Image (cartoon, coloured by chain):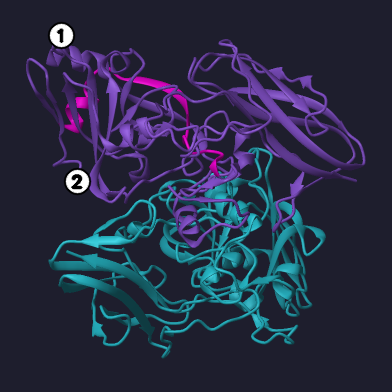
Chain colours: A cyan, B purple
């Protein structure tokens, strides 16, 4: 992993930014992110899949392997739930030194209305062995990472895979999965960062030993010091609030311009660890804070929670900030907590606003 | 307009790249770009529109002004047509010195299956005056550009606005327009760059004098020398071919890795000026060229044309290139033709491939 202290972004980082999509922050106004505005991080290429020929294999340490068509999966009990998903690298380009990878600022998030069939009953039908430890999820996407040609594969503890809200999802916002979201089938593991939500799923393998693949052991680990080579795994989403920047933007700088007077700032907050308990807003760059009003919790545990804040905008230059906290006692930091991979940087958002 | 000779990208450019979406180039395999993969350039913010309250005004130099609801527009004769759309700034970040704006590499393109009602009969019903020169199209999006707060407005010659294939579009790929593509209504002007395809359309004004708004007179002009302040207008899409990079990518560098042996390279080609007549491919960085096979033209004039090229990949490092030409005699250049705004850089695509 290379680093850069510079403000400037390399051509390699730009090539990644040109193909991976952020969610424009004004889309925080929607409870469900319209298809096409949800963030996208595509490790390799989007595969073209013939869904008639496609099958899902479930094998490994099970009593009986299963081979399932898309029709067979869609004939099983279906669950629809809104789930907020964030890239583990969201905020990476705000770290210093900056880890060189997809240079996300704040936009790598979205909330889909996902439909799928629960995974737990399928594991039950296959008969997971008593020695099972991990479950490996393999996608159809293939590329080179860390110098090694590989399929995209992620491992997950078998108890986590058995959670009742874990889905094999085949629809987003009432439509078949778009190719870029994993058509025909993806894993949906609510509360976790996006790297765990394996797209273009082709195989689920129950293992009676720990999974040691690249995405779990090399990538997606918190390594907080230069000599920490092992690190700890990246799992659930850190607590975060984001606001839709108020007013209107300057095209080039994206700086916000706002009229004097009352203004309602709106946004969303989420945490993979526990329900959100509060959001605070600062209009002076974090010197003083006031509580925002949380929207009623109506969308279940795994969707972001809306919030609003009445602000009386006075003439001049202001820096708006917001920060969330959750039931487990997590709160967003004012300063980023650096790690080598640039994961989970949930330092508070800062929005410069000119009021006149 | 600022410039940079450096390879590195500024934070302002990154902020634009984080919110505007490119089409990942593997999506060149689709004739119709799946919703969510089409490129997006949002000048200001995506407005939230209440379509029940929304109306389209048609006014100015007409015998009778019209005020139309979305239902009224959808009750009129409907046309569905595939149209390729490209951002005028596509290729900007490949220029040197690099104009500072949205730093597109090659991905700012897509082909939608658009549905709408033709504009010409509406202009006819309103009774366009004999002195009419231009038509101004105003969107609901508002921002600051060149230091001036403004709505997004584009002017168009009245004869161009009367072309029979110009649509007021309310659907994309069989669904209502997504918010980011201009819900509830946008202009569709086949053959032109994206800046002319005004989104979130609220007003059409017939003018009996030339339109002098910012987007036509200040932005979107070819200024080919440092002292050319007037320039000439950016209009139709230059001739271009792009390939879906073959093989598999390295995650970080996006460099392609390919197996030895026969390989079919596929891509698309388009020109706003005239039908595509040929595409050539080079496997040696542009030293030698061979003709690709064009797909039958079945999708009408305004959709890109598919092409394929059989390549026998030999071990080693190669640079693949492709270039298109059209019936009007346009051909893609090997070297970029610089201009101050960074528009219409259709220099040939170059894809580095490692074969082993």
In the image, A328: left or right of A132? left
Q: Which of A119 and B356 is in front in this view?
A: B356
Which quarter of the picture shows residue A29?
bottom left
Q: Percent from the top left, x then y, of residue B212?
A: 24, 30
Residue shown at the point (32%, 84%) measured from the top left: A286
Whether residue B89 is in magenta: the answer is yes
Q: Is residue B90 in view from this perspective? A: yes
Tag in front: 2 or 1: 1
Specify the label residue B50 is tagged with. Answer: 2
The N terminus of chain A is located in which quarter?
bottom right
Q: Earlier in the sequence, mark 2 or mark 1?
A: 2
Query: Where does label 1 land, which residue?
Result: B130
Q: What element carries label 1?
A: loop
Asked if the residue under mark 1 is in contact with the one under mark 2, i.e. CB atoms within 8 Å, the reply is no
Residue A271: where, in percent of width, then height?
A: 43, 77
Q: Mark 1 lies on which chain?
A: B
């Amino acid at each position: 992993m290379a680093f850069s202290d510079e403000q400037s972004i390399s051509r390699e980082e730009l090539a990644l930014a040109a193909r991976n999509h952020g969610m424009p922050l004004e889309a925080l106004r929607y409870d469900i992110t319209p298809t096409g505005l949800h963030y996208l991080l595509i490790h390799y290429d989007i595969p073209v899949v013939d869904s008639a020929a496609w099958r899902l294999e479930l094998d490994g340490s099970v009593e009986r392997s299963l081979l399932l068509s898309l029709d067979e999966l869609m004939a099983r009990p279906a669950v629809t739930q809104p789930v907020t998903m964030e890239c583990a690298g969201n905020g990476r380009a705000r770290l210093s030194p900056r880890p060189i990878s997809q240079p996300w600022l704040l936009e790598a998030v979205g909330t889909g209305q996902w439909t799928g069939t629960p995974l737990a009953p399928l594991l039950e039908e296959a008969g997971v062995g008593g020695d099972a430890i991990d479950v490996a999820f393999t996608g159809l996407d293939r590329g080179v990472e860390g110098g090694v040609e590989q399929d995209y594969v992620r491992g997950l503890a078998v108890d986590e895979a058995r959670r009742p809200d874990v889905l094999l999802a085949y629809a987003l916002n009432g439509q078949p999965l778009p190719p870029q979201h994993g058509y025909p089938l993806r894993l949906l593991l609510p509360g976790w960062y996006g790297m765990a939500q394996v797209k273009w799923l082709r195989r689920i393998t129950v293992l009676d030993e720990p999974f040691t693949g690249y995405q779990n052991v090399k990538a997606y680990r918190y390594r907080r010091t230069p000599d920490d080579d092992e690190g700890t795994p990246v799992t659930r989403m850190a607590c975060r609030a984001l606001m839709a920047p108020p007013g209107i933007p300057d095209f080039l700088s994206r700086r916000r311009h706002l009229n004097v007077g009352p203004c309602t700032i709106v946004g969303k907050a989420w945490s993979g660890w526990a329900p959100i308990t509060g959001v605070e807003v600062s209009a002076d760059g974090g010197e003083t804070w006031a509580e925002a009003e949380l929207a009623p919790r109506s969308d279940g545990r795994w969707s972001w929670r809306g919030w609003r804040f009445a602000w009386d905008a006075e003439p001049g230059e202001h820096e708006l900030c917001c920060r969330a906290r959750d039931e487990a006692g997590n709160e967003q930091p004012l300063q980023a907590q650096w790690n080598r991979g640039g994961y989970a940087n949930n330092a508070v958002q800062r929005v410069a606003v000119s009021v006149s």
